[in-house]
Amino acid sequence: MTPPSLTLFEAHAAPLATGFGQITTVMELVRTRGIATVEGLDTRTKVLSFARQVMTLVSHRDSDPDALTTIRDRGASSQRPGLAGLGTGELLAHTERSSLPSPPRLMLLVCQQPADSSGNVLLTDGRALHTFLLERAPQALEMMTLPGTAFYGDGGGHPSQIFTRHRGERITIRLRQNALAAFSPLLQPHLAHLRTAIETVQQRITLNAGQGYIIDNSRWLHARTGFRGDRVCLRALGSPRTPIPPGFPVVDPRADAVPDGLPGTFLPSAPVGRTLL
C-alpha cells in the first residue's frame, strides 16, 4: 500500500477527520476552512451514506443512478471537450461545473483504488491564492474581479469572472482552464500571474483506498496529476445540509468596492499557462 502523504494537506488545510460519521466535525471544518479530509469510506455504500448526510445530492451528466459519479479511465470518450476527468491525463486547477449559473457548493471525492503510478490530488485554497495575488500582483487581481471577463462552457455556458466579491467581505472563486474556457483580452495579459500563484500555493496529496476530501466548491480549486493504472474514485456533488457562507473572508479595504469592469470581447482561449496557437 502506498503510504498516505497527508502531512502537507493537514498543515495547510484541515486536520484529518477519521471515520465517516463525524458529520458535525466535518461540516465545521468545511464552514471555517472550506475543506475536510475523511477516511474509512472504502465501499460505494459508505461513500453514498456519508454524502447523503452532509449534502443534498445533485446528479451530473456522467453520474450513476445513485447520483455518485465513478471517476476512472473511460478511454477514447475522455478526449471529448469537458470529459478529460474520465481519462488518465492531468487536470488543471478548476471549479467543478463552472459553466453552470450556480455550481454545486460541495464536492466530495473518495479514492476506491489508487493508480499504479501518480494520480495525485492538487488542491488550491482560493483564499491563499487571493492573498498571494493581492501581495504580488494586485493589478492582475483587480482584472480578475472585472465582471464578465471569463466565459466557461460551450454556447450554453456562463459568463463570469475569476473572483467575485460579495457583501460581508466575502469572495468566491470560479475557474476553468481547458478548451471550454474563454477570457477577455482585458484579462488575458494577466493570466500568467494566476498560473504562478496556483503553482505556488497548491497542495499535493496522495489518497489511499477509502480516503478522500470534501471541499467548498466556491473556495477551493481541485486538480490532478496524470497517472497510469486503473485509478477509481467516487465523486458526489450537492448542496450542504448545514448552511455555510460563500467562499472565504478577506480583510481588505477594497473588498467592498466592486469594479464596474467592461465585459470585453471573448477570444477562444487555451488553458492558463498553455500556448494558444
Image: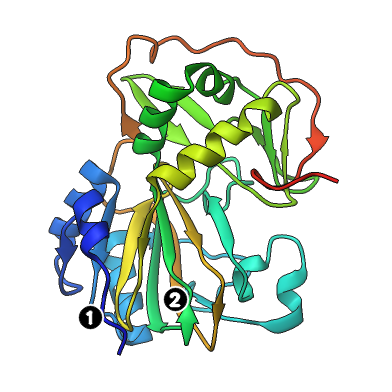
Report crowding for label 1: few under 14, some 14 to 19, many 20 or more residues within 10 A (C-alpha). Answer: some
Colour convention of the picture = rainbow
Q: Can residue 247 be seen at all in this image of the molecule?
A: no
Q: Is mark 2 on a helix, strand or loop?
A: strand
Q: Which residue is drawn at 32% across and 34% down?
A: 248
Label 2, residues with CA under 10 Å away: few <14, some 14-19, many ≥20: many
Q: Position of residue 101 (x, y in %)?
A: 59, 40
Place of residue 110 in the rendered image (x, y in percent of width and height, measured from the top left): 37, 73
Of the numbered discs in the image, which one, if any, rests on residue 40? 1
Above or below residue 240? Residue 144 is above
Q: Which of marks 2 and 1 is nearer the N terminus?
A: 1
Side of 153 where 129 appears, left or right = left
Q: Residue 233, relative to residue 7: is it above or below?
A: below
Viewer can see residue 186? yes
| Residue 218 figure quarter | top left
Question: In terms of depth relative to the viewer, which is nearer, 7 or 179?
Answer: 7
x, y percent for residue 61:
63, 66
What number is the disc on residue 234? 2
Task: Say which element carries label 1.
Answer: loop
When asked about the image quadrant of residue 130, the answer is: top left
- Quarter of the image containing the N terminus? bottom left
Q: Which residue is drawn at 54% across and 35% down?
A: 194
Q: Which mark is residue 200?
A: none
Q: Compute the Cα span from label 2 to label 1.
A: 13 Å
Disc 2 marks which amino acid?
Answer: Leu
Along the viewing direction, whichever of 188 and 109 lies nearer the viewer: 188
Amino acid on which the number 1 mark rests in the picture: Gly
Percent across and percent down for residue 103 are 52, 47
Residue at x-position 25% and y-position 63%: 37
Q: Is residue 98 above or below residue 89?
A: above
Decide if residue 250 is on the left or right side of residue 277: left
